[in-house]
Amino acid sequence: MNECPWKLACVDCSAEYSGLAVRFRCDCGATLDVVHDLNLLKDGLTLNTFDRRLASKQIWDRSGVWRFSELVLPLDPKEMVTKPEGNTNLYASARLAEYTGIESLLLKHEGENPTASFKDRGMTVGVSMAKKLGMQSVACASTGNTSASMAAYSAQAGLRALVFIPEGKIAYGKLSQALAYGAKTIQIAGDFDIAMQLVEQVCADQGIYLLNSINPFRIEGQKAIGFELLQDLSWEVPDWIVLPGGNLGNSSAISKGLGELETLGLIKKLPRMAVIQAAGANPLYTAFSTDKDLVPVQNADTIATAIKIGNPVSWRKSLRGIAATNGLVEQVSDQEIMDAKAQVDAAGIGAEPASCATVAGAKKLVERGVIKKDEKVCGILTGHLLKDPDAVVGYHKGTLDNIESNFQNAPISVPAELEAVLKAISD
Ligand SMILES: Cc1ncc(COP(=O)(O)O)c(C=O)c1O
Ligand SMILES: [Zn+2]
């Protein structure tokens, strides 16, 4: 155990554990960080190391996670369960620049990962660790994307996968993936927060490896969104990174990773991080605005089902990262999310509702004068448009409850006659 180059440390007290311990919480109950010995990395690791790997044909260099393995987890390539992931596009759009009021807005589309969400970056690391630790079964509670990703990676690794989902509350694209990749899918008659409590208990009781973002190795993989984003920008740090917040693993991960790059002297400043929550699932927004500990939101509700979470596991880590980057938390309504989504989709980029909280939040922060129009802003789109086709069709048909279809593109039904078709396409 001594030779393990990383360790686990409590976010709240001074306790430390072996890097190979199968545990997800400190004895005090708080969550754990993976801590690397950055002193070991100070000599020899340069940004060139990562850039050189872009030309490599090795699958671990082609992965947008394992390319940064020194900073993520220094596993042997034989231990990596990779597809590979990452290498997602960074889009500019005149339409979205105008919509948000930000001249230099770039959107990194994490929906372009192998299972169509950012979760693959954490999952490649989490599933690799499950294998390394000799686990037979893995489990997660999910609003959909984690289960899709875990199901695919555990199928690849030959592990038994159990997913706990809130019944009737996840988008069909995601449910289809969990079923198709062969995960045993348990639909809980309750919300995500209840499913999360249950999966933690089941894993502790049955010796099953927990692969929610409470698993600190998932967070290490998700850091690579920030690394790859900076690499896309030739290591020039933007003014802002904007992203949606649900269980808050992603914001915790990106700020942790960029903080480590800064500690190593590989970047000279940090971008400010803006975490955007849905107004109906906004416990971090309230905690941040009132400068208090997080109080869970009961019966969290939003059309953006991926972030319909009232009791986020990683809130402490997330607030720590927001403070370190001089960041902030904003909230947006479902109407703002769906209108922003219509714009992201019509720009030819497309993303699922939760992802578009990013664009809705960036627009709002410009309107509030927090983000300046000439600042360089990078938004993270976390999941693919096709994850939630019901939200798209409902918006454009005008059938969503309590949502105005302000940018509607409704399908037109016509009789099967040339004249009717010509009339329909003429206006
Ligand atoms: C598409 C999408 N966006 C955002 C999030 C929120 O990420 P986090 O839980 O890391 O805050 C999720 C989580 O499931 C998601 O699936
Ligand atoms: Zn502790």
Image (cartoon, grey):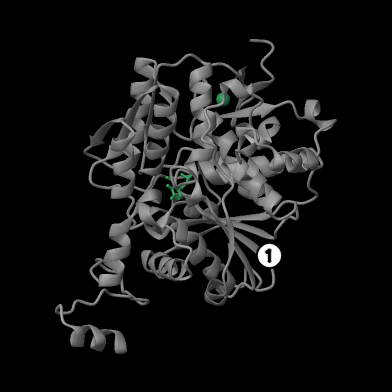
Residue at 82% across, 42% down: 265
Decide: is 186 above or below 370: above
| Residue at left offset 58%, top offset 62% | 91
Which residue is found at the position 30% from the left and 37% from the top?
A: 180
Pinpoint residue 268: horizontal percent, then vertical percent: 80, 49
Identify the residue under disc 1. Answer: 376
Q: Looking at the figure, which quarter contains the N terminus?
A: top right
Q: Position of residue 394 (x, y in %)?
A: 27, 65
Q: Give the class, few, some or many, for how many residues have Cα within 10 Å of label 1's Cα (few <14, many ≥20).
A: some
Residue 29 in sight here:
no
Residue found at the far right of this picture:
43
Relative side of 397 to 246, left or right: left
Q: Residue furthest front?
A: 418
Q: Quadrant of the C terminus?
A: bottom left
| Residue 173 at x, y percent in the picture | 32, 48
Q: Is residue 51 above or below residue 406?
A: above
Amino acid at pointer 1: Lys
Give x and y (percent) for residue 34: 62, 28
Of 274 and 147, which appears nearest the observer?
147
Ligand 2 falls in which quarter?
top right
Image: 361 above or below 137:
below
Q: Is residue 116 visible?
A: yes
Q: Is residue 157 above or below residue 359?
A: above
> Is label 1's Cβ within 8 Å of ligand 1?
no
**What secondary structure is marked by label 1?**
strand
